[in-house]
Image (spheres, rainbow, N blue to C red):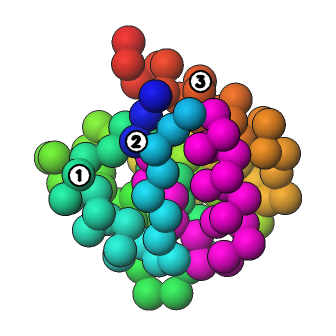
Amino acid sequence: MATIVVADDDADIRDLVVFKLEQSGHQVLAFGDGASAVEACHQQVPELVLLDVMMPGMSGLDACRAMRADPTLATVPVILLTARAQESDIEQGFLVGADDYVVKPFSPRELASRVTAVLQRSRT
């Protein structure tokens, strides 16, 4: 299927996301912070990146900005995962270049569906 980078500082959420994506047939590279995720993307460009918005160091918003500013990573789809559900937070996510925005708590089945939809759109 697809190679997906996941960055979330909450190990339980990260493990749940990795489990669901691997169950769906994807290869997943998981990290606890945005900087490590961006670095991994430079080493092997993934087909999709899932970023928690609130992480220590480089936030998901900062990681998304960094990817969009890098010609090698600018077209890699990004889904933001976050507990921040205010309209202004969602707007900010899309302004930095996210392709989708999933609010925690989320259904693992819904996340898998959104991943599939974003991957399909990016491949056409």
Q: Which residues are magenta?
A: 4-24
Q: Are marks 3 and 1 in contact (CB under 8 Å)?
A: no
Q: Does the magenta-highlighted stretch encompass residue 20?
A: yes
Residue 123: image location, x then y, percent: 38, 19
Image point (51%, 58%), residue name: 6
Between discs 2 and 3, the one toward the N terminus? 2
- In this image, 14 relative to 110: left or right? left
Marks 2 and 3, how far apart at CA: 15 Å
Q: CA distance from mark 3 to mark 1?
A: 22 Å
Q: Label 3: how many residues lie within 10 Å, few (<14), some (14-19) or many (20+)?
A: few
> What's the CA distance linking mark 2 and mark 1?
9 Å
The tag on residue 44 is: 1
Residue 43 position within the rendered picture, expressed as x and y whole percent measured from the top left: 19, 59
Helix or strand or loop: what does disc 1 sit on?
loop
Q: Mark 2 touching mark 1, by CB under 8 A?
A: yes
Residue at x-position 44% and y-position 58%: 29
| Residue behind mark 2 | 3
Three-letter code for the amino acid on which mark 2 is drawn: Thr
Identified at 72% across, 66% down, the residue is 13
**Can residue 6 be seen here?**
yes
The image position of residue 17, as x and y in percent, is 66, 54
For the C terminus, the image quarter is top left
Label for residue 117?
3
Residue furthest to the top in view is 124
Most extreme residue toward the left is: 71
Q: Is residue 105 above or below residue 53?
A: above
